[in-house]
Amino acid sequence: MKRPPKHAPARIDSTADLRRFQRMMAAAVIRPLDADDNLQQKWVDGRAMADVAAEYIKPNDRLSSFERLQLYNQMYWYRLLEAVRDDCPGLRAVLGEPAFERLARAYLTDCPSQSFTLRNLSARLADYLRAHPRLTAPHTALAIEVARFEWAQTVAFDDAARPVLTLADLAASPPRRLRLGLQPYITLLALRHPIDTFVISVKRRDVLRAEASNAPESPAGRRPTRVRRPRPGRTWVAVHRHHNRLFYKRLEPAAFRILTALQAGRPLAQAIAAAGPRVKPAQIQAWFTAWMSLGWFCAPGNKRRGRRS
């Protein structure tokens, strides 16, 4: 965002005045809260924020100009923090609430929203964790994998679906030239931890917590337990959707290699060869039958950045 103007316009007499006012208001609303979750006392140029707010916000009989602006500033930040919390239950479980809160505030300060929709708010989180490992130490590697996995869920939930290829489409080209695209909503992840089962456990725990908080008296033995961080274990998984529901599908390493080769644009014959010589044709046939039934294949198109990781 461009540096805001030094002063708000005294009147709105033109579209240039309106743009100037909008930039001033937006900069004030998205400005990070202070340590006490209040509007910062100083403006970007060092002037008292109360004086700056008085230039373009009228007080009323209950609130000063500063206090009225502070409400918008707080509501903006509380909504963004809530959205990141909702996006990242697994990451919260890895770090714990205090550490996650510090991370979320740092991330939103350094990577402010650039989209009209909250859907994209966590898109840069995994890269941010790589660049700022002190915020997640000593669990940085695990935190990065969880952040990648949780962003993949967002992609799977609402990214585009392209027309599904049929058997007739496949028969139209020889395997040496045939290229298959993967649906844009599919993310392939090679992980060092079983993040899929971990996230499922966290979600189940949160459901139990919600049920317990809504019950007049929580029955003995129903109290949700803490979900332990997963132990290392190589895992290959596709995060996808089917019939508008989110799914995680475990993959054999050879199957993962085939899919990543197809996703990279390699011809079908080369992708199958990437599975390795020990994989039997019957296995490959079974995998492709399952993938076809899920509607994973589409005509190849532009590869999205960051899909394979």
Image (tube, grey):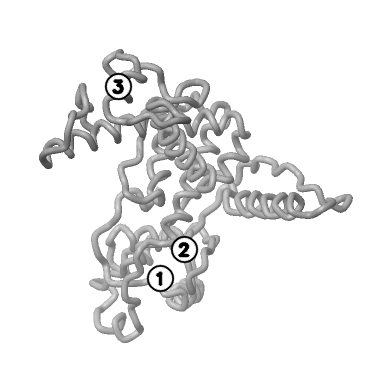
In this rendering, would 4 be left or right of 28?
left
Left or right? Give the position of 73 relative to 96: left
Q: Residue at x 46, y 33 (%)?
A: 74
Between tags 1 and 2, which lies in front? 2
Q: Amino acid at mark 3?
A: Val
Sequence-first tag of 2 and 3: 3
155 relative to 99, above or below: below
Front-lying residue, 207 or 72: 72
> Does residue 129 appear in the picture of this structure?
no
**How many numbered discs?**
3
Cβ–Cβ under 8 Å for marks 1 and 2:
yes
Which mark, by number, is residue 151? none
What's the residue type where badge 2 is placed?
His
Task: Give coordinates of residue 105: x percent, y percent.
Answer: 47, 30
Residue at image mark 3: 52
- Toward the front, the furthest residue is 61
Q: Residue at x 87, y 50 (%)?
A: 221
Residue under pointer 2: 240
Dividing the image into 4 quarters, which one contains the N terminus?
Answer: top left
